[in-house]
Image (cartoon, helix red, strand yellow):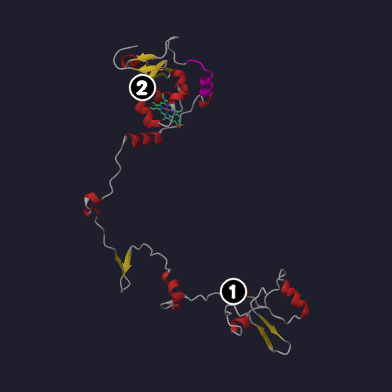
Amino acid sequence: MSFLWRKVLQSNSSVDVVYDEDAAPSFPALDSAQRANRPQAEPDENDEEHDERSTVDESIVTVTADRSSVDMPPPTRIPRHQSGGGGPASIVSSARAPPTVQSGTTSSSGQERPLPKFNFSNIEESTRLAAPPKTAQTTAALARRRREKVALEPGFSQLDWATLKNSGKDLSGRPQGIRPMQISLEELKRHSTKEDAWTTLGGKVYNISPYLRYHPGGVKELMRCAGRDGTRLFNITHMWVNYERLLSNCFIGYLVPGGGS
Ligand code: HEM
């Protein structure tokens, strides 16, 4: 049997109840007011047993155990002002809205009293929140935010640079056949013009003249590392940029201490 018990109302009002011995007790009770006031359930099209009985006798009422939840009325809402202590009402009343910010408190006479002023100068120096120290990184980040976007000339986009680079053309400008060169700091310093700009990044020396107009940060910024070691400046600006790949065709040689060439 798919149902736990069946209650059959006969036309002469006598009640015949069939009990299943292992079933849990009915809740609400069979003869409770809740069941008496319960609206008539709509016939379920998928309920074969109901269909079967309805063709026999319409006065037959069937209540299955899983329908008992339908019989439970929704919990009654108790207005806040009526709720005392205990029970669900206390749960409702404890869920108060957070207090609003007040400019002062109201005295019994109805006049508003100002809140006491807090003296911040009394706080111990050590307990105050210290501003983060200004590092080279934060200074560079601020400068970058204020800087205007550089408009590259047509034909000098990063894609154009990639095309030129991938052509395999040697852009180092060093004499043919000599590779790689050993360059001293003295020698590096002599190459600091736009037409002949060298820089060293991580110990490698590059001819940056061909790249100047392609640089997304502009010619002026890139020229700041011309004729000197640009490693630090490069790293604080954009250490994520892969300069070794970008400038591979511009590679001249290695920076060496002292003289050399
Ligand atoms: C030779 C070395 C350098 C190379 C290969 C290089 C390459 C690049 C590349 C690929 C970008 C685009 C990065 C991105 O969008 O994430 C860029 C942006 C930038 N670079 Fe460089 N850079 C070099 C040196 C420098 C130096 C020395 C400075 C400044 C002193 C500088 C300043 C900038 C700035 C400010 C941007 C941001 C441009 C923007 O977002 O509009 N770069 N650089």
Quadrant of image for the N terminus? bottom right
Identify the residue under disc 1: 69
- Tally of numbered tags: 2
Identify the residue under disc 2: 203
Asked whether residue 167 is drawn in magenta, I would say yes
- CA neighbours of label 1 inside 10 A, class few (<14), some (14 to 19), many (20+): few
Q: Which residues are magenta?
A: 160-170
Front-lying residue, 144 or 59: 59
Alpha carbon separation for disc pair 1 and 2 = 79 Å
Q: Judge left or right: residue 171 versus residue 232.
A: right
Front-lying residue, 42 or 152: 42
Vertical arrangement, residue 13 with respect to residue 152, above or below: below
The label on residue 59 is none
Q: Judge left or right: residue 20 versus residue 207.
A: right
In the rendered image, which quarter is residue 138 located in? top left
Quadrant field for ligand 1: top left
Q: Position of residue 186 (x, y in %)?
A: 31, 15
Overall secondary structure of the magenta section: helix
- What residue appears at the point 52 percent right and 20 percent down from the top-left corner? 164
Q: Position of residue 240 (x, y in %)?
A: 42, 32
First in sequence: mark 1 vs mark 2: 1
- At label 2, which amino acid type do we have? Gly
Asked whether residue 256 is drawn in magenta, I would say no
